[in-house]
Image (cartoon, rainbow, N blue to C red):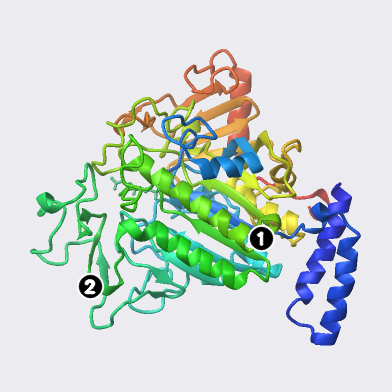
Amino acid sequence: MRSGSQSSRNASGETRNTRNVLFFPVRFVAIAVSMLIMASMPTSVYAEAPNVLVIMADDLGYGDVSCYTATEFATPNIDRLAAEGIRFTSGYCSASTCTPTRYSFLTGNYAFRKKGTGIAAPNKPAIIQPGTETIASLLKGAGYKTAVIGKWHLGLGAKGVGPDWNGVLNPGPLEIGFDHCFLLPTTNDRVPQVYVNDHRVLNLDPKDPLWVGRKKPSDDHPTGETHRDTLKMDWSHGHNSTIHNGISRIGFYTGGHAARFRDEDLADKWLEKSVEWIEANKDSPFFLFFSSHDLHVPRMPHERFQGKTKLGYRADAIVQLDWCVGELTATLDRLGLAENTLVVFCSDNGPVGDDGYVDGAIEKMGSHRPAGPYSGGKYSVYEGGTRTPFITRWKGRIAPGVSDELVCTIDLAASVAGMVDAELANSACVDSFDVHEALLDASAASSRDHLVQQDNGTVGNFGLRVGEWKFLKHARSKANNLQVNKKLARTKVPKYQLFNLNSDPGEKTNLIEQNSDIASEMKSRLEELIAQGRSRPVPSAAK
Ligand code: NG6
Ligand code: CA
């Protein structure tokens, strides 16, 4: 199987590389010959350079979809994806906040290795420097068309300068391997509420320039504090600065009125742009990073989804996300691409109840458990912070199943490189493991035997999972040990903890005293993984 797929990857790679450069007669012969070669191969083996569609949800927990543990509402489209593909029970993102997970998903490097990878502020310059190998640059190098549509939150603009909102927003995604981007540049709760199309803010009227800053621009500037009674959704903590669409945000901005979006329209816009881009690029291999803002606060789904569940806008936003997944897969079906597209569904961090707005998420939670059986959620290094829904589907190639193998969003870079046979330098994507065999086969073992989990930035809270064991190191005596159905609270935590995830998935019983040998071994391993600057082993021939 392995050697078969290896040679076919080479064959299909050559076919793709010749796609745009050959003149008609040569091209015709090349196509005819390659069709003959392909016809003689089993189809499942021929197509090892599929389109790649990564759908990343925002703040979606392990228990937030019905093919995992949700019972209070249904996510039929995500469930169908899982039923047609592989549902991973140990699928992770690498951090429990957005920016570090997205950084490591794209670069294949743990975010804790690089300063400045915590939750990015509105005027943050580009975090990933041009020249850095990313999942997008790897696939672009392999002949793919590449795009990111949706939430970015990885900074824009030059180091020490930041985004030039009225000019060219460079560097950004286009400088690290994407051919096209259509972005929510920061988060939906951070200013400004505008779209970025490639290098520019879309629909910006030069006569109404956009200003973004940390300080109130004038004494009479309306904010969530001064005009609280006008808000359509109140804030609970933070989020009390500039008001747009009846919702006050983090940070201040003025101008750019013609460019501003309505929160209710975001999901439709991501979809519209994605369908447009897929249609335009369906004849070449493509990589689309569909980066949904759902269900990040302010949770303000389109009117047609408001009230769809009994659980308020948090779950309504999940239903909206599920609808997007359905529309994306329907688009693949309509264009005949489902059997040539690997779809990966994942999340950027675990769930949170009240993340700064009064949207009833906690009050209406009822018996729903957003993190499923796990403790913690967004901001924490307990399993709930990073163990999230993780699904792969490739119709006709992946046999449906459930896998307990360890896989992480950070592995997607090396895995797609392995899948399409693109060369991955030892110095690139140093924490990304090629787990593509496990991603494509529920019975295959993952090449990843451990995973470091982090919270936000470089504070120093870590989790290390090895097999059934989970070791935690907390840098401070208090941490976000939140229960998702309660208000965010920092509680006292011991510096080190050890849990057996098989017998205690909820990480309730600290076994550090009883298993001091395992704990000290894992502590040394964690220190080593941090200190050695990489975790993917260098092949011995290259040492
Ligand atoms: C926090 C915000 C939270 C959210 C988070 C980033 C406050 C009080 N809290 O600082 O609302 O925006 O940053 O979320 O401002 S993430 O999913 O993009 O990482
Ligand atoms: Ca997030």
Q: Residue at x 23, y 43 (%)?
A: 237
Q: How many marks?
A: 2
Q: CA distance from mark 1 to mark 2?
A: 42 Å
Amino acid type assigned to the residue bearing label 2 in the image: Gly
Residue 528 falls in image quadrant: top right
Query: In the rendered image, which residue does mark 1 sit on?
Result: 337
Query: In the rendered image, which residue does mark 2 sit on?
Result: 255
Closest to the observer, 532 or 74: 74
Closest to the observer, 421 or 272: 272
Residue 339 falls in image quadrant: bottom right
Image x and y of residue 313, in percent: 32, 43
Identity of the residue furthest to the top in this view: 514
Q: Is residue 177 visible?
A: no
- Sequence-wise, the earlier of marks 1 and 2 is 2
Q: Residue at x 26, y 37 (%)?
A: 360
Q: Is residue 277 left or right of residue 537?
A: left
Q: Residue at x 78, y 52 (%)?
A: 543
Image x and y of residue 87, in percent: 62, 38
Q: Is residue 543 left or right of residue 288?
A: right
Amino acid type assigned to the residue bearing label 1 in the image: Leu
The label shown at residue 319 is: none
What SS does tag 2 mark?
loop
Q: Give the foreground label among 1 and 2.
A: 1
Image x and y of residue 355, in percent: 31, 42
